[in-house]
Amino acid sequence: MLIQDRILVILKSNNLSASEFASKIGINRSNLSHVLSGRNKPSLDFLAKIITNYPNVNASWLITGETREGGFTAPDESKRVSSPNETRGSLVDTSTQGVEKIVVFYTNGTFKEYSLR
């Protein structure tokens, strides 16, 4: 089953016309028409609007046609305390690269060095 067929299943199961569905998820009717005809592939924003407006639609099923159980929960960054020697995000894997120092350059032209050893 193609993605446009899965979108049609959502329309039919909610007794909506293509025009009503487009209005409900906040897209142009022509965009929906192009996706349903197979002319265009739906964008990530398009799919996100479907998932947001129809929380009962399984995102994996919508995208791949296969239902997956489980889910990913992002760690709560607000409870995390970072040290001066720790960068936000994973810019460098210090365990394999042997990083000795990190230099942070500020927009005012100053900088600060952090030694990791």
Image: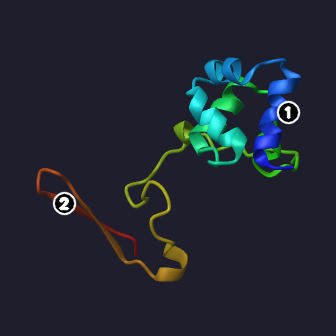
Place of residue 71 in the rendered image (x, y in percent of width and height, measured from the top left)? 79, 44
x 71%, y 32%: residue: 51
Q: Is residue 85 left or right of residue 28?
A: left
Disc 2 residue type (three-letter): Phe
Query: For mark 2, does the 10 Å Cα neighbourhood hold few (<14), some (14 to 19), or many (20 or more) residues?
Result: few
Mark 2 or 1: in front is 1
Disc 1 residue type (three-letter): Val
Mark 1 = which residue?
Answer: 9
Mark 2 = which residue?
Answer: 111
Task: Indicate the quadrant where residue 49 lies.
Answer: top right
- Residue 32, relative to residue 62: is it above or below? above
x 73%, y 46%: residue: 72
x 61%, y 37%: residue: 46
- Residue 9, relative to residue 75: is it above or below? above
- Does residue 42 appear anywhere in the picture? yes
Q: Is residue 20 left or right of residue 14?
A: left
- State the residue in front, 86 or 53: 53
